Amino acid sequence: MTDAPRTLTLTEVEALARTAHEGQTDKAGRPYAEHLRAVAEGVRARGGDAEQIAAAWLHDAVEDDVLSAHWLEEAALSRRTKDIVLAVTKRAGEPPEAYAGRILATPGALLVKESDLAHNADPVRLAVLDEETRKRLTEKYARMRALLGLG
């Protein structure tokens, strides 16, 4: 009998995500790692498990091209964590309905996206943006919440 391959710990995943996104900022000019931490903490607070928390740390890595899809496929992560990351990764030109459908079809992904949307739509975060951007993003996040059945 062989031992199961070792998967990265949450501490290792966090460090990896922070390094991958180093130097990146959000729309408000804040270090991107703050968003990753908030999404991971949101997943934890909503009852998410370690695989979902790992996916939260990595949820934008492939989309932002800081880690490749090939890297993710080869990474020492569970299949479920990889599937969640891929589910929440937006694809160029993809309709929001298809994106939402993939999230809903992937076990564990909805909780990660819910946490991501909650942090993205945080009024404190949005308040520092210009009115046009704030309005556009608020509508975008509300539409995605509706497509995902999040009310």
Image (cartoon, rainbow, N blue to C red):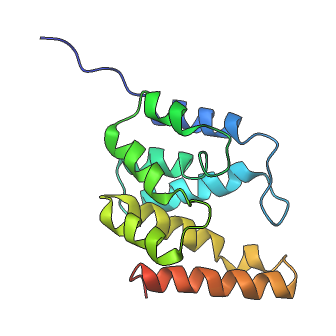
Q: Position of residue 140 (x, y in %)?
A: 63, 82
Q: Quadrant of residue 47?
A: bottom left
Determine whether, in the image, residue 54 is placed left or right of residue 91: left
- Which residue sits at x=68%, y=37%? 20
- Which residue sits at x=29%, y=58%? 107
Q: Quadrant of residue 125?
A: bottom right
Q: Position of residue 101 (x, y in %)?
A: 38, 71
**Residue with the most extreme left position:** 1
Q: Is residue 55 something one can see in this rendering? A: yes
Q: Is residue 75 something one can see in this rendering? A: no
Q: Is residue 102 above or below residue 73?
A: below
Which image quarter holds the C terminus?
bottom left
- Which residue sits at x=47%, y=68%? 99
Q: Position of residue 32 (x, y in %)?
A: 73, 52
Name the residue nearer the viewer: 141 or 52: 141
Determine whether, in the image, residue 2 is placed left or right of residue 127: left
Name the residue nearer the viewer: 84 or 98: 98
Name the residue nearer the viewer: 146 or 65: 65
